[in-house]
Image (cartoon, rainbow, N blue to C red):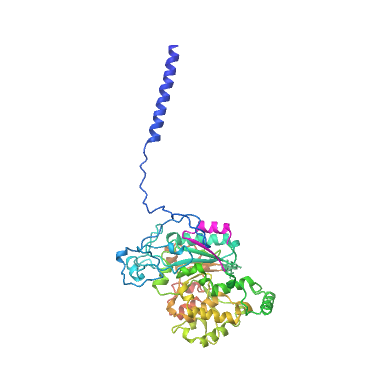
Amino acid sequence: MVAGNARYLRYIVIAVFTLAIFYFFSSARYDSVPIPSSLGRTDAAPKPNTGSSENIRSQPQVQQPIEKIDKIDKTDKIDPAIKTDKTGKVDKSKADTGTGTGTGTGSSLKKTAGNTPLGTTPDSPGWETDLVSVAPGPRMNATFVTLARNSDVWDIARSIRQIEDRFNRRYNYDWVFLNDKPFDDTFKTVTSSLCSGKTHYGEIGREHWSFPDFIDQDKAKKVREDMAERKIIYGDSVSYRHMCRFESGFFFRQPLMMNYEYYWRVEPSIELFCDIHYDPFRVMHEGGKKYSFVLSLYEYAETIKTLWDSTKKFIKNHPEHIAEDNSMKFLSDDGGETYNNCHFWSNFEVGSLSWLRSKAYTDFFESLDRDGGFFYERWGDAPVHSIAAGLLLNKSEIHFFNDIAYYHVPFTHCPTGEKTRTKLRCHCNPKDNFDWKGYSCTSRYFDVNKMDKPEGWEDQKD
Ligand SMILES: Nc1nc2c(ncn2[C@@H]2O[C@H](COP(=O)(O)OP(=O)(O)O)[C@@H](O)[C@H]2O)c(=O)[nH]1
Ligand SMILES: [Mg+2]
């Protein structure tokens, strides 16, 4: 009996002891490492749907201040190309509504650049080696832009993932998606989960995606039938023609695009092969660039039979728009008499929206549009943009982004030079580089601009 009581007593003591230990650990304080308040902050309340959808997941507030307000010279002119708010901080809120001018209280970039130099080569000041943290420096008033169908969702997902991994996760630029039909929920959910900046979704108005009334439908139909017979790629497609006309004349005037000064066009299924150590939008702004490319080639002549005749007509009617130091030599081998079909491949573009919205460019587009070649032939937006850049801009306003290694089926731009590729952690095969091959116009571009070709280019010729 006594032994039994002692046993119960032992059980009770053990139970009390166990409870005490449990209580001790469960109420002990855990001194965590303090998290800076700026990290992990999210946008306040979800915004109402304004026709463009906000990013579904909350936005990390990761952009860095440009400079303190007291450093801003109040006499400086407002620069719409730089995104700032009244405190001198990078301001993303102006992109929210899809309206407005996107201007802020900005200092001139040159001044900002003094604080955060733009390093574009490994030995220049400001070259970024820390590719983990949020990128320092200002943000431009810029956005990615993609025209896509709902069915393109998984192909554009791949492109976004690569752009984010190689560049935008440190910069968080916005992304505008445009479609001739409403975007569905899957498209919005997938893309907004991948983009680190804000996402906007716009439906294109019918007037920008239909036959203008001056187009003779019978004539256009006959052309499509004939091109189908001759097996010209996309020759029988109506939607492809709307797409080319839209990219030539309307994407930059969509309401969602009016907020921005610079764009970077991204298509489904592209690849980026190297780290991007600096902000290409800043290169455009600080370098006074209006148009840029990574790949160039000859256009399929059958699709643009009268494009150059229309161009010559425009030159005659609008000599005031032709730049003094233009790139006619890139476009023509006989002083402008005929087109050599060289063009910048427009599925990649970083460019100035102000330039596309300028009178010079819109006069050019409208003149071509009236001639009907988007439907009576199959004019592509690539030769249209390229001829415009070549004639309306000075040479110094066009930029070749050697550091942006890129693929769009079937061509690759892989930077020439092993040192560059290693430094940028590229994963492209240098043998695939198209730049110096016979069907590329990049060698001609270098010659016209009297640029030195990179060491080793001759070994990649064919
Ligand atoms: N919304 C929409 N986008 C289109 C249509 N056709 C082409 N696109 C987009 O326009 C761009 C160019 O089309 P793509 O098929 O890649 O042409 P390619 O690069 O010339 O072969 C891509 O971003 C496509 O997603 C269309 O009918 N509707
Ligand atoms: Mg494409």
Residue 228 placement (x, y as % from top left):
68, 74
Residue 36 or residue 53, whichever sits in front = 53
Read off the magenta span: 183-204
> In the picture shown, does residue 157 fall above or below 9?
below
Q: Is residue 315 inside the magenta stretch? A: no
Q: Is residue 359 visible to us here?
A: yes
Residue 306 placement (x, y as % from top left):
60, 83
Horizontal side of 305 relative to 11 (left or right) equals right
Q: Quadrant of residue 449?
A: bottom left
Residue 339 placement (x, y as % from top left):
55, 83
Horizontal side of 63 relative to 217 (left or right) equals left
Residue 251 or residue 331, whichever sits in front = 251
Ligand 1 sits in quadrant: bottom right
Q: Is residue 184 inside the magenta stretch? A: yes
Q: Quadrant of residue 27?
A: top left
Residue 104 placement (x, y as % from top left):
39, 67
Q: Quadrant of residue 268?
A: bottom right
Q: Residue at x 41, y 31 (%)?
A: 22
Residue 15 or residue 295, whichever sits in front = 15
**Outermost residue toward the top?**
1
